[in-house]
């Protein structure tokens, strides 16, 4: 049983150490479900997607299941679906919130792990020492707590990390989160709040895995950048994956007003190859939903 920590920077350091000890598969495939509620009606469209760690490439089929079931034909055209043939998107209602170029193993700045199957696993205790130095943690080394190591055979991919004095962090307490108990950290960005977006972070008291977080804004483009979001995580094969991202206020996209928006990652799995139609190509003038 892990000792209860009282220093918020050490809790954050333990969370980073745990994240960077993870491993993710070389290739993962999954479905991104975009859910909206408009005028009281719930609508969902799904996109097949994948992440290639070796190439550091996100792959998405830009034509959702909804588009395939209800194709749009350009007026006066030749009877084919323009979106399916990559000739742009003449129908403004094709995507609810943009084409989601998103990966379920995105870190939100919690940690970073070197890519490549030959990369050795990081030293967990060295990561804790680094976070102490980074945040000027006053706790002496003798108060180290053993860091859990993720199961072998998986690899982590992330592109955002915190830097020295990025956040002022306080410990709000220990709270129940989805059948477990978690440290609740409150993070106040000390600079560039549009880039350093974490506001609340819940860390499992036993494994130091992230359970949940709240960020001040989400994504790079589109309406998600104007509202706060809540993000939940799940454990698959001993590693942390995003389960869902939910807008905490109503959002507006062009002429649409959504009272609720959420994005879920479904059927996350390791694969040897990606399915037909999944690629890095996106038709021109398409709104891309992606992370920094």
Image (spheres, rainbow, N blue to C red):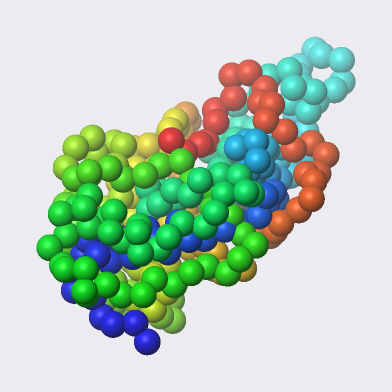
Quadrant containing the N terminus in the rendered view: bottom left
Q: What residue do we see at 83% from left, 39% from top?
A: 276
Q: Residue furthest bottom?
A: 1
Q: What residue do we see at 54% from left, 28% from top?
A: 287
Q: Residue furthest right?
A: 79
Looking at the image, is 235 positioned above or below residue 267? below
Q: In this rendering, would 55 be left or right of 171? A: right
Q: Quadrant of residue 221?
A: top left
Between 280 and 34, the one nearer to me in the picture:
280
In this view of the protein, can residue 241 be seen by the observer?
A: no
Q: Position of residue 42 (x, y in %)?
A: 57, 54
In this view of the protein, can residue 183 be seen by the observer?
A: yes
Q: Position of residue 46 (x, y in %)?
A: 67, 47
Looking at the image, is 34 positioned above or below residue 68? below
Q: Position of residue 175 (x, y in %)?
A: 29, 77
Q: Residue furthest top?
A: 76
């Amino acid at each position: 049983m892990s000792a209860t920590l009282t220093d918020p920077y050490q809790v954050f350091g333990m969370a980073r150490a745990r994240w960077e000890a993870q491993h993710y598969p070389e290739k993962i495939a999954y479905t991104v479900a975009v859910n909206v509620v408009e005028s009281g009606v719930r609508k969902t469209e799904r996109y097949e997607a994948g992440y290639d760690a070796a190439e550091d490439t996100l792959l998405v089929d830009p034509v959702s299941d909804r588009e395939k079931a209800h194709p749009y034909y350009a007026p006066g055209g030749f009877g084919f679906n323009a979106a399916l043939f990559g000739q742009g998107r003449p129908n403004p209602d094709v995507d609810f919130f943009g084409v989601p170029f998103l990966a379920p193993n995105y870190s939100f700045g919690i940690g970073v792990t070197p890519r490549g199957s030959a990369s050795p696993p990081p030293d967990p205790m060295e990561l804790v020492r680094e976070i102490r130095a980074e945040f000027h943690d006053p706790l002496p080394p003798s108060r180290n707590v053993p860091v859990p190591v993720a199961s072998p055979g998986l690899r982590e991919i992330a592109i955002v990390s915190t830097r020295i004095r990025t956040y002022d962090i306080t410990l709000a307490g220990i709270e129940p989160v989805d059948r477990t108990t978690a440290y609740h950290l409150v993070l106040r960005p000390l600079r560039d709040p549009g880039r350093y977006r974490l506001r609340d972070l819940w860390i499992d008291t036993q494994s130091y895995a992230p359970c949940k977080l709240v960020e001040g804004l989400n994504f790079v483009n589109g309406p998600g950048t104007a509202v706060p979001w809540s993000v939940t995580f799940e454990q698959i094969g001993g590693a942390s994956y995003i389960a869902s991202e939910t807008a905490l206020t109503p959002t507006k996209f062009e002429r649409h007003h959504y009272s609720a928006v959420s994005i879920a990652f479904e059927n996350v799995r390791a694969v040897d190859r990606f399915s037909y139609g999944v690629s890095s190509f996106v038709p021109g003038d398409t709104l891309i939903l992606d992370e920094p």
